[in-house]
Image (cartoon, helix red, strand yellow):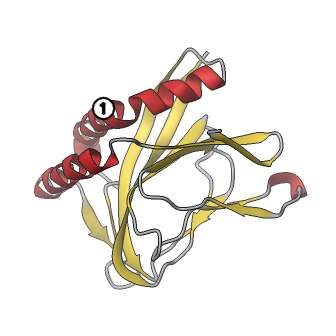
Amino acid sequence: MPVLHPFKPIPIFEEVVTNNDDAIKDYKELIKDLQIKDILKLVQKDTSPMTTDYFAEDDKWDYKMIKWEEFCFKYVGDTIRKFLKLNNYTDCGFTEIWTQISNGFQMHHPHTHGDVGYSFVWYIDVDEDEHEGTYFYAPYGTTPEDFQIKLEKGKFIIWPSWLLHYQPPSNSSLDRCVISGNIKIQQ
C-alpha cells in the first residue's frame, strides 16, 4: 500500500518510480543544463558541500521551474495523480522544485516547508547501502517519536509540508541526488 501512517492520522504517501533509470539519464542532462546556465551551484563549499538550485536568482527562477515541471510531470505525473485520487483532490500545482546533490557529512538540518500544502522528495539517484532516508519528527508529542523513510532508489514520497524533517548525514563519498519541492492542492 502506498500510504504510511507513522503518526496517525497524518499520511505519508510513497511509491517507487517505475522508469527511474530513464529519469536518471534525463536528470543528468538537466543538471548539466542548469550548471551551464549558472543556476545549479555548489553552496557553502567550505562548510557544506551541497550542490543545489534552491537559491536560484529571480531572473532564472522561471526557467528552472519550467524545466523541473516538465521533468516531474513526465516521470512522476502518474504517481502524483494516484496521490490526488487517494485523497479525493482534483488538481495540484508545483510551487517550488529544486534538486540537492550532497555527499560526505552533508546533512539538511531539521526544517519544515511551512504551511504550503504538501512537500515531496524523490530519491532519484541514491545508494541504499550508503545513504539514509528522510527522518521525520513526531508532531504533537505522539508516539512513535520519530520515523525514518526506508531509502530506495526511485522512491517518491509526499507528506504534509508542516511536518518537521531532516536529511541525516551519510559519511559517503557517493553523491546523494534528490529532487524536492512543494505542491499546492486545488480542491
- Which residue is at the front of the view, 78 or 31? 78
- Quadrant where the N terminus sits is top right
Which percent across, then down, holds residue 185?
Answer: 57, 25
Query: Quick one: which residue is furthest to the left in this view?
Result: 36
- Which residue is at the front of the view, 94 or 71? 71
- Which residue is at the front of the view, 74 or 111? 74
Q: Secondary structure at mark 1?
A: helix
Other residues around mark 1 within 10 Å, as few (<14) / some (14–19) / many (≥20)? few
- Quadrant where the C terminus sits is top right
Q: Is residue 44 visible?
A: no
Q: Quadrant of residue 149?
A: bottom right
Which percent across, then down, holds residue 112?
Answer: 62, 53
Q: Is residue 124 above or below residue 87?
A: below
Which percent across, then down, holds residue 160?
Answer: 66, 41
- In screen coordinates, is 174 left or right of 158? left
- Taking the spot 42% from the left edge, 58% from the top edge, the residue there is 153
Q: Is residue 8 visible?
A: yes
- Taking the spot 46% from the left edge, 44% from the top edge, the residue there is 181
- Taking the spot 41% from the left edge, 51% from the top edge, the residue there is 154
- Taking the spot 34% from the left edge, 85% from the top edge, the residue there is 46
Which percent across, then down, holds residue 118?
Answer: 59, 38
Circle count: 1
Q: Amino acid at mark 1?
A: Lys
Residue at which label 1 appears:
74
